[in-house]
Image (cartoon, rainbow, N blue to C red):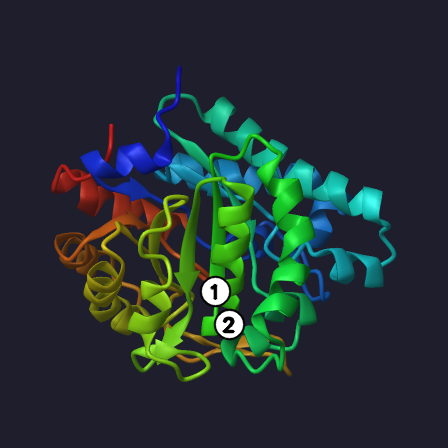
Amino acid sequence: MTRRALGAALGSGVVLLDGGLATQLEAQGHDLGSALWSARLLADDPDAVLAAHAAFFAAGAQVATTASYQASFDGLAAAGFDRAETEELLRRSVALAARARDEAGGGPRWVAASVGPYGAARADGSEYRGDYGLGVDELRGWHRPRLEVLAATDADVLACETLPCLAEVEAVVAEVQRIGRPAWVSVTCAGGRTRAGEPAAEAFGLVRGVEEIVAVGVNCSDPDEAGALVAVAAGASGLPVVVYPNRGEAWDAVGRRWTGSAVFDAEAVPGWVTDGARLVGGCCRVRPEDIAALAAVLDADQEVVR
């Protein structure tokens, strides 16, 4: 089957994303307690990553988001991987997602190469604070090597996600423009603002007029807040909106655990679609059964791209 470009598909309906890859890997029995999180399994057990992607496709997801979120050059170097090995693991993350897509059959289906934030590589929870102390040029330099490797793969789109501050959004958007590959940009927010406390609308507005950006929105945020941010993102950017919240729990970086109650509700999603959401799914703690419930709701409304 010839795949339509993801950006073009968004003009004809909703595309269903997957959920929390690490959550599914843990459900499969893997310990992700290291600083590399799910990226460790790219080296240690790639078949486990393949199986996790397959579980989300079986649940109805149309996009596999790669296990490269925490796979950075400095993070992998600290774990003993050299530059060539890191490049191979990044390429492998895309190859595994593409294999799962092809084995799932049917369609349409796509692969999104995950580009996690600087804070993820630090493994200290700073992606939920945005207090990096780095400027735009420094963040551009940090993101550039990984973006270049992932852009050279067969991924359909770069998923620049969980960005907590204006500086990192600006840096990533500039690098995506330089590379010239399709991407979505997704910000993590709380209380209607970026995690660094800046206006969310300002973050979303940074992509306006950037032809490489196919969607902008929010991820790894409380689902009770996500809906309100869809309209903000649509208005500020003029683009389709991507929205994939977590289950409503909060990440304890010291204890390396999730706390609080889950509030993810598939029934809320049609309202997001009305406000401009065209890529919808889940982030941390969202399981295949949650994606199946979301698929059922969207199918009932005949919203999903076919």
Q: Residue at x 21, y 70 (%)?
A: 228
Residue 144 percent coordinates (x, y): 64, 53
Residue 164 shows in this picture: no
Q: Residue at x 31, y 51 (%)?
A: 280
Q: Quadrant of residue 90?
A: top right
Residue 277 percent coordinates (x, y): 23, 53
Q: Residue furthest top?
A: 1
114 to 139, vertically: above or below: above
Quarter containing the N terminus: top left
Circle 2 packing at 10 Å, graded few (<14), some (14-19), many (20+), is: many
Name the kind of residue labelled 1 in the image: Glu
Q: Secondary structure at mark 2?
A: helix
Circle 1 packing at 10 Å, graded few (<14), some (14-19), many (20+), is: some
Question: Can you identify the residue that label 2 sits on?
Answer: 167
Left or right, 118 with reference to 245: right
Left or right, 152 with reference to 55: right
Left or right, 125 with reference to 61: right
Question: Can you identify the residue that label 1 sits on?
Answer: 170
Q: Nearer the viewer, residue 162 or 67?
A: 162
Q: Determine whether label 1 and label 2 are within 8 Å by CB.
A: yes
Residue 221 percent coordinates (x, y): 38, 70
Residue 17 percent coordinates (x, y): 37, 45
Q: Quadrant of residue 77?
A: bottom right
Q: Nearer the viewer, residue 135 or 277?
A: 135
Q: Residue at x 56, y 83 (%)?
A: 131
Q: Secondary structure at mark 1?
A: helix
Name the kind of residue labelled 2 in the image: Ala
Left or right, 127 with reference to 278: right
